[in-house]
Image (tube, rainbow, N blue to C red):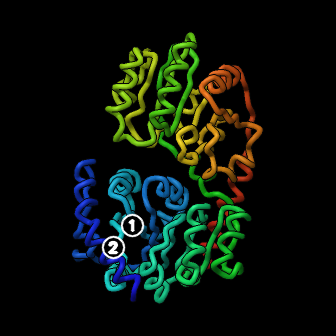
Amino acid sequence: MIYSFLYSLVMLIVLPFIKIKSQIKGFDFSLKERFVLYKDKGDSYIWFHCASVGELNTLKPLYEYYKDKYKILITVFSPRGKKYAIENFKEAKIRELPFDLGFLVKRFLNIYKPKALIIVEEELWYNLIKTSSKKIPVISINARISPSSFKFYKKFSFFFRKVFNYFSLILARTKEDKDIISYFVNEEKIKVCGDLKFVSSLNSKDINLTFPTDKKIIVAGSTYKIEEEMLLDILKKLDNIILVLAPRHLERLQELENLVREKGFNYQFLSKSKDIKEKVLIVDKMGYLSSLYNYADATFVGGTIENIGGHNILEALLKNKPVIIGKNYQKIKPIYEQFKEYITIVNSKEELLNAIKENLSKKTDINIQEKIDKIFKCYIQNLEKYIK
């Protein structure tokens, strides 16, 4: 098929660069796993596929629910995701996703004999989905199509209609997501369950820290350089404040450390101290952000001043913390629409400063547990129909 030929051609060109980039970042890109060049035995796995860390976090509540009922197999696309999966899904078998060629997918299926393939969010690998669908149910969960992806998919709708129709079931986040996806597949295959991130935000690693009682705490999660620069400049104008900076990508830790030093602040790393005394706390470990929001008097979620589209704001909302974001929140718009009374949008450094000052004194009661329980029940009830 043309797709397989073009895919193979592209992989031959980009594979050396992917391998080198992974090694530079300290991750293992395993050709042995990508070509399924290993012997293993398995039977009756529930197979989940996640692109990387974000999708793995979304998967956590379903993993916790199913891990004592079935054997769990998790494939990941990114080497960083594999490392994170090994560290955080210890009772699952973790593999890198095979290259998207039919014979490799068949080999993988023959080794592990899964009951079903459950794909988290927006991963559309043609041969993975087509080949798997001939043997087992293929289900998309927390399904969505971003506006940019939709424009691209529409141009090649003849191809993507084929892909979507191989799914047995598509569990979408919102009615809007269902309407977009139904452009490619009969809407009878699509159910709206809600955003699984609502549920996954409840799962985090606990951490016990001691902050000075006379200080207020700002927690900034999933940040990028431009946002960190603004927050550090604002910190100079605030008294009795400790700023917690959790960068989106831990590979940037050295860059962030240099920036904090350039701005003239003393700092500590989360991994090295539980007694926090310095002006800036740098979060250098993954999985603790949700717990850190417990200590916050004000919160900011990044990727929203930097034009990324936003990251998880539910972690803060679930801790009863009002949230400040920038104007670029297109990826989290469904969540924003549901909780906008607790969210402040800022367009400048001055607006960010004013919002922080206001939120430092704001007390908010946000009770969304009933909504979370309903979402999780919807996913379980629909998945159980196909996991046999």
Q: Inspect the image, locate mark 2, and give the three-letter code of the amino acid beneath it.
A: Pro
Residue drawn at x 57%, y 37% as measured from the top left: 305
Q: Residue furthest front?
A: 155
Q: Position of residue 354 (x, y in %)?
A: 67, 22
Q: Are marks 1 and 2 in contact (CB under 8 Å)?
A: yes
Q: Quadrant of residue 283?
A: top left
Q: Is residue 329 visible?
A: yes
Q: Which of pointers 1 and 2 lies earlier in the amino acid sequence?
A: 1
Residue drawn at x 30%, y 71% as measured from the top left: 11
Q: Quadrant of residue 100?
A: bottom left
Q: Secondary structure at mark 1?
A: strand
Q: Residue furthest right?
A: 341
- Image height of 227 relative to 37, above or below: above
Q: Position of residue 149 (x, y in %)?
A: 56, 65
Q: Inspect the image, locate mark 1, and give the three-letter code of the amino acid beneath it.
A: Thr
Q: According to the image, label 2 marks what residue? A: 98
Q: According to the image, label 1 marks what residue? A: 75
Residue drawn at x 73%, y 26% as measured from the top left: 363
Crowding around mark 2 (Cα neighbors within 10 Å: few <14, some 14 to 19, many 20+) is many
Q: Position of residue 191 (x, y in %)?
A: 69, 72
Q: Where is the N terminus found, in terms of image quarters?
A: bottom left
Apparent side of residue 77 relative to residue 329 in the rendered image (left or right): left
Q: Where is the C terminus found, in terms of image quarters?
A: bottom right
Apparent side of residue 376 relative to residue 293 in the rendered image (left or right): right
